[in-house]
Image (cartoon, coloured by chain):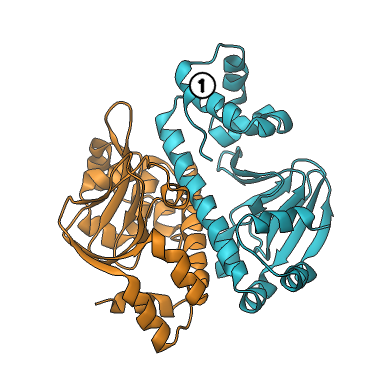
Chain colours: A orange, B cyan
Amino acid sequence: MYDPLLAHIRKFVSLSTEEETAFTGILRHKNVRKKEFLLKEQQVCTANYFVLKGCFRMYFIQDNGVEQIIQFAIENWWITDYQSLDWQQPSRFNIQAIEASEIAILDHHVTAGICDRIPRLDRYFRLIAQRAFAASQQRLLFLYTFSGEELYHHFNEAFPAFIQRVPQYMVASFLGLTPEFVSKIKSRPVSPRAKTFPPSR
Amino acid sequence: MYDPLLAHIRKFVSLSTEEETAFTGILRHKNVRKKEFLLKEQQVCTANYFVLKGCFRMYFIQDNGVEQIIQFAIENWWITDYQSLDWQQPSRFNIQAIEASEIAILDHHVTAGICDRIPRLDRYFRLIAQRAFAASQQRLLFLYTFSGEELYHHFNEAFPAFIQRVPQYMVASFLGLTPEFVSKIKSRPVSPRAKTFPPSR
């Protein structure tokens, strides 16, 4: 059931079979319906979520009612609002399934305990958090460096799996573009820079 | 010499006196001149830096030559490019001292070893990375939610220490505003929303 998660952990740290069993023993498994929420604005976030299968978006609603997506998560990604989780304060974000999905839930109230018992998990989650932070720094770089058109084509090249699965208006929201603009540029030839720029990971 | 760092660690985890001594024993101390660089674009980042005294900025240079600041660090903040550090690949960023400063350097090549020896350090750096990631998610929320004027006043309220120490054009760059715009709004009365919005931490 948790094989994709154990495979992901093994890329970063080595756990004994007993430790793997202890860790998966405190997880909760959940099938999530399309459009179901893991977190809603004003709720306190209670867990970190690992995507075993499916796809999620994290977004907030702007004053003018427009949904602004700040993160996607597909298979092998963790998704949560650390601000809400670590301080146990109400979240400003929503986390919602884009497809029918399957997740492993690591509840906040058991996280410190299991990391006390298996300190290698602190290493694993440290490296995960560092990668997430690095990706958000890279994202700022792209947002400020690329034109809207380059941004779309770069995203397309770097994350082809997303483009196949995520509705076009959500990709537009993530990139800060209008759906109309994305429709327009999709038909144009790709500019050289967007083609050759290396993906962030 | 490293007292502010040890005080910072104690807010997150408990180390024995022996462990504290072992940790500070592998750090390097450095006095940094104003405008000196810890990292330059195209270099591979070799360390994580803790600010004992002083102030730094992390920025990149846009195609049009404009410097875009993506992060500041003052006392008790860690600053590095995790993308470059964790993958040992050339950085897109510069890290430069804004004032004469004093730092503790945790070299990349000794980090895994000291965390093996003192697993609580993995916990400490996990929580630090989660906070940094959370702050960058909040920043995106502010960038998309606030007008330029609200953004400036919010930053002013949330981080008064920065505003005192950092040149106005750098604050403008961090917020994605022009220096002229910041000069103009500084003289206007503060709008109610920017005044009451809670700071991110």
Q: Residue at x 24, y 77 (%)?
A: A1
Q: Residue at x 57, y 38 (%)?
A: B64
Residue A62 place in picture, x, y as percent: 33, 31
The residue under label 1 is B195
Q: Is residue B7 above or below residue B165?
A: below
Residue B88 appears in view? no
Q: Is residue B96 left or right of residue A196?
A: right
Where residue B28 sits, quadrant-wise, is: bottom right
Question: Which is nearer the eye, A103 or B142?
Answer: A103
Residue A48 place in picture, x, y as percent: 37, 59
Which amino acid lies under the numbered mark 1 shown in the image of this protein? Lys
Q: Is residue A6 left or right of residue B41?
A: left
Q: Residue at x 22, y 59 (%)?
A: A164
Where residue A53 sits, quadrant-wise, is: bottom left
Q: Chain of mark 1?
A: B
Q: Is residue A109 left or right of residue B153?
A: left
Q: Is residue B140 above or below residue A95?
A: above
